[in-house]
Image (spheres, helix red, strand yellow):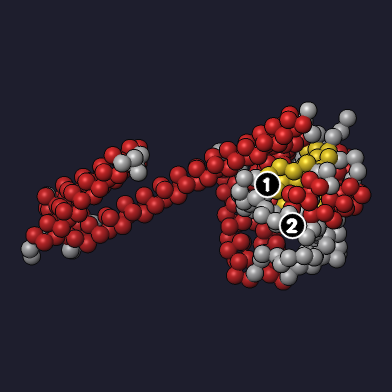
Amino acid sequence: MKTTLIIVPAYQEELNILRVLEDIRTHIPQADILVVNDGSTDQTAHLARGVGVRVIDHPYNMGIGASVQTGFKYAYEHDYSEALQIDGDYQHPAQEGPRLLQALSEEKADLVIGSRFIKQTGYRGSWLRRTGNRLFQWVNALVVGQKIVDNTSGFRAYSRRAIELLSQTYLGDYPEPESIGYLKSQGCSIIEIPVQMRSRPEGASSITPLRSVYYMVRVLTSIISFNQHSRR
Amino acid sequence: MNFLLLKISTFFLSVFLLVWIFSLVRRRLLIEEYSFLWICIAAIFLVLSFFHPIMDKVAHWLGIDYGPSALFLFFNVVTLFILIHVSIQLSDYKSKKRILAQEIALLRDKVEELSLR
């Protein structure tokens, strides 16, 4: 039987975590949920436990890459056959989750990315963000050999094989674009489907113009290096 | 030109470096593994301070007119490599530290589950 783990990486999400969990339970009731609390100092973990959700606590803040990896390790050890990542900031609507999981099994893919840019899906993002994404698309198409429209989307479904590979690989602060290059190099198949996303409701996004330049350089470095690395 | 002052200062600098490194190792503030590099550097300085012509020859080969400039260049290059080396080690520690922290988190979850049985 298929078993699904929903991985919810969360850092300081006390304002969002409860509605994220409720949203998941409403739309994907058959799946187990794991909140990876990345060293939050607020009520995130407490609130999640309060509604009976399993929580793994990082002893200190390690970043999103470590958080999703902890989720993959848990999923791998507990023999889940597939995983769905839904971020703890309420950006990813759980009602789109079943479509991602369906695509995973129907297309026999290892990674299904819920993409914001394939069709008009309501999400536009800032001019800078769209330009940055276009740059990632171009670089990824070049090094990965597949056009990925939304490299930075964290709304994704993973196969057992992807879970295994990613549980053993160091992903840095930008795990989404990194993992695309890595999985592709391991012969995994990746598909994208369009999804609706919400814009961040509570708390500001950490991306400012100056930071996005820093962000772009770092992400590009990781995309390129991951592909070089895997060719060896 | 008289390089006596340079010789003396380089000599004292390298002796100071050696004594300092040894005392750090002795007090366990620096593990022996990492002292090696610094001892080598101190030794190179010591040699250069005594055998000044080596520096001039090297400078000449490199097309540098002024001997002590070659020393600066040498030191800058060495520092650059050491810094990269330190970054590599830092990366290694960071990824190992992450594995340990994740193991702890996953084990704690298991312990809690077992204690509830």
- Count the numbered circles shown: 2
Q: Mark 2 or mark 1, which is nearer to you?
A: 2
- Looking at the figure, which quarter contains the C terminus of chain A? top right
Q: Residue A37: x and y, percent?
A: 70, 48
Horizontal side of A130 relative to B56 (left or right) equals right
**Placement of B42 over or under A75, stated as above or below:** below
Q: Element under label 2?
A: loop
Q: Residue A131: x and y, percent?
A: 69, 67
Determine which residue is flagged by label 1: A67
Labels 2 and 1 positioned on one and the same chain: yes
Determine which residue is flagged by label 2: A13
The answer to whether residue A67 is visible is yes
At a point 89% along the width and 47% down the height, the residue shown is A25
Q: Residues within 10 Å of mark 1 (few under 14, many from 20)?
A: many
Horizontal side of A193 relative to B65 (left or right) equals right
Q: Which mark is residue A165?
A: none
Q: Specify the amino acid type for callout 2.
A: Glu
**Placement of A231 over or under A139, stated as above or below:** above
Q: Element under label 1?
A: helix
Quarter location, residue B32: top left
- Looking at the figure, which quarter contains the N terminus of chain A? top right
Quarter location, residue A200: bottom right
